Amino acid sequence: MQKLVFVIIFISVSFSYADEIIGSLAILNFQESSVISNDKFKEYSRGIDDISKMDNITILDSIQIVEALNTLDYTKNIHELFNSPDDAGKLGKYLHVDYLMMGNVNLDSIGFHLSSKIISSRSSSVVSVIDVYLEDVFSLISLESQIAMWELLGKNTPGFLKQERINALPKNGELIVEAKTPLGAMWRSAVLPGWGQFYSEKRNTGIAFPSLEGLLASLLLYNVSKYNTSVENMNKFSSLYHSSTNEEDIINYRNGSKMYWKQHIDANNAMILLAKSAGVIWAINAIHAYMIAPRPKANLYGPDPPDSPSIIKSVSEFLSE
Amino acid sequence: MKSQKSIYLFIFLTLLISQSCETFELELDNPIDTIANEEADVFPPALTLYPLTIEASVNEQFTVSLFIVKPDTTLAGIHARLYYDVSNMVPDTITPGILFTNDGVVTPLFTNDISEGQIDINVFYLGDQFSYVDQTGHVADIYFSALTASTSDITIDSTESELVTPADQVIPLKGVRGSTVIIQ
């Protein structure tokens, strides 16, 4: 029976863990705010279409985004979503996706600045960022013209120019790193059952584990009280038994002593069982917290669509092509 | 703060459980209890001394009571022979118990003879009284004075002791239990 319970728990936990392996991504496509001119829009749309063919990716246009935000009673400007990871996280949860990807173009002190982010729905934290400055692109054009001169002359391009080209290209986005970690969830649940689950925003199990522990603790305390009462009564009856010289009283005190002795053994066995169960569930709760905690997804975009580049390909690769 | 509380709770529960996990053996051994006697291979009808262990100080007086356990027949008299260590204790007085006197209502013939290390107690209903007892009960109290620090036994001689029915038949005694006296 105990084995069966463990198998059921293990399978349940495994399923909940397996559910986390592959992620899903929603791309917020604010087309009307894009700096891309109408002439170039066709190219941009073709790129978006290719991406939309990927299994785990959903692309939302402005109308869909506004509709979703209205349902969430989001009253701010939709472009502010870019700088509000908490609201983005809520939107991600509403859309049932693991991550949200969005981009924004700003004019700051350096120049035009393209910033793209991936935000985790679970932890509402920025898990990957890529920044590209238009200034860098202009520098790259100048550099490319120098390289082109060397190539027109049929000479080998000097190494320093090649190195400058590498340096000038925008770098890959940072690796996806969740602000909330499995270890963070595990130690929290090890200290207080359910805390790690709440930390990972798994409220149902976050309530279930402490409730179960609370129930076991209550039963444990009840049995502790029963044990103490039984021992007290057993000692009382045993003392009366030994001090009595009346045959009838002796029989009654013997029976009483035996009854309370059995009760104290039963209560003790129950306490051991409950303590062990509480310990096992405490450990399962910590392991569960580790398993369900936010972690970078192994495959955000699913299998590559035919004849289409991976969206994880770096900007530098796009530009160098 | 939350984690500190839970650590205190954990320590409290651990202490509570570790303290509570102790189980006790139940030792029920009263020489007047038939079950306890049977567990000690003493079968009824038996003559036993109560209590099984007596602790006394030097020059202190202590009492040993003589009991008949489960005669399961009518008894008109008992003869009990006890042995004790003369170097450690000395008997002072011997008084009849409530079984044969029926708590003072009847007056049986009650005699005792104390010689070196040996006590003979006789309790008999006289012929014209036509009385008998048939249950477990208190036969006599023997008052001793402790002499020297020691541990010794007061024993009952099963061959010399006997139970007698109103028809003057001797019933064989199946068991006896003595007492251990610890003088400090």
Image (tube, grey):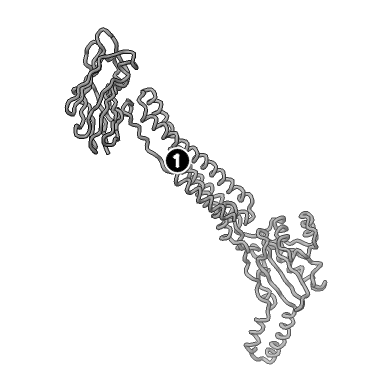
Residue A208, position as x, y percentages in the image: 60, 47
Q: From this viewpoint, which residue is outermost toward the top?
A: B128
The answer to whether any part of residue B79 appears in the image is no
In-image side of A112 versus A186 (left or right): right
Q: As displayed, is residue B147 above or below residue B15?
A: above
The answer to whether any part of residue B170 appears in the image is yes
Q: As displayed, is residue A103 above or below residue A230?
A: below
Residue A270, position as x, y percentages in the image: 47, 40
- Identify which residue is drawn at 72% across, 71% down: A115
- Identify which residue is drawn at 59% across, 56% down: B1
Disc 1 crowd rating (10 Å Cα; few below 14, some 14-19, many 20+) is: some
- Identify which residue is drawn at 21% across, 34% down: B88
In-image side of A207 versus B137 (left or right): right
In-image side of A192 versus A312 (left or right): left
Which one is in front, B16 or A19? B16
Residue B157, position as x, y percentages in the image: 20, 26
Secondary structure, mark 1, is helix
Which one is in front, B132 or A279? B132
Please tell me in which quadrant of the rendered image residue A112 appears.
Answer: bottom right
The residue identified by callout 1 is A269
- Identify which residue is drawn at 79% across, 63% down: A78
Which quadrant holds the C terminus of chain B? top left
- Tell me the kind of residue under disc 1: Asn
Residue A193, position as x, y percentages in the image: 57, 51
Q: As displayed, is residue A314 above or below residue A201?
A: below
Chain at numbered mark 1:
A
Q: From this viewpoint, which residue is outermost toward the front?
A: B59
Please tell me in which quadrant of the rendered image residue A114 appears.
Answer: bottom right
Q: From this viewpoint, which residue is outermost toward the right?
A: A38
